[in-house]
Amino acid sequence: QSVLTQPPSASGTPGQRVTISCSGSSFNIGSNTVNWYQQLPGTAPKLLIYSNDQRPSGVPDRFSGSKSGTSASLAISGLQSEDEADYYCATWDDSLNGYVFGTGTKVTV
Amino acid sequence: EVQLVESGGNLVQPGGSLRLSCAASGFTFSNYEMNWVRQAPGKGLEWVSYISSSGSTIYYADSVKGRFTISRDNAKNSLYLQMKSLRAEDTAVYYCAREVAAARFDPWGQGILVTVSS
């Protein structure tokens, strides 16, 4: 059972804005940076956001991340059909001495 | 091009063993920390193990501690995962991933399926 909680699903119509939350604790999100991954159907995960709010080159600026206290969020603005995927947050957990992933959120457009 | 390619996946009986390999290319393998992450069928991502660039520091998820061993051969640009006492719940696609910074895994391999079943 993951220590990072995400809503199981989120949806929107093309052009809308969708936000995904990732809730943790002082041992993980509260004391470490958060990264987000996008997993398109049948493919390996891909880094989407790193260090809470940074986009790797090639990731559209429609994707943005933020962190506050023990929670983080991923926002997708101008939703497109190709954004249909599973999204996961991830960070280090100081109490578990290991990395933890969120429960995952399936985005439907 | 930075590339990671896993191999060694198979069908194995409960209690059996298996060794996964991950071949790295397109970057200086010895400079990077590496990880294994798995995904059970229809489930989310689960971090399995971490190894530092030199191999001197290793971490495991509690679910595999004592049964799995991560290792690397920097001369061969390869990462390994030795799995023993396999259980049905170890059935998953196993990914190797390069660690650029804490929890920043980029890129990932294509994944390799391990099935534990009698």
Image: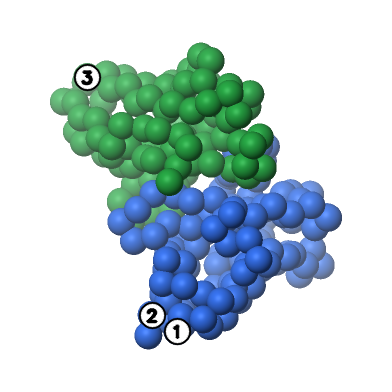
Amino acid of disc 3: Gln
Amino acid of disc 2: Ser
The percent coordinates of residue B72 (x first, y second) are 74, 65
Mark 1 vs 2, N-terminal side: 1
Front one among B8 and B12: B12
Tell me if residue A77 can be seen: yes
Residue visible at 42% across and 22% down in the picture: A73
Residue visible at 42% across and 76% down in the picture: B116
Mark nearest the camera among 3 and 2 is: 2
Secondary structure of the residue carrying numbered label 1: loop
Front one among B101 and B81: B81
The image quadrant where one finds the C terminus of chain B is bottom left
The answer to whether dots 1 and 2 both sit on one chain is yes
A97 to B115, vertically: above or below: above
Mark nearest the camera among 3 and 1 is: 1
* Spatial separation of the CA atoms under disc 3 and disc 2: 44 Å
> Tag 3: Cα neighbours inside 10 Å, few (<14), some, or many (≥20)?
few
Q: For mark 3, what is the residue?
A: A16
**Do callouts 1 and 2 mark residues in contact (Cβ within 8 Å)?**
yes
Chain B as rendered: colour = blue
Residue visible at 30% across and 51% down in the picture: A41
Q: For mark 1, what is the residue?
A: B13
Q: Mark 2 lies on which chain?
A: B
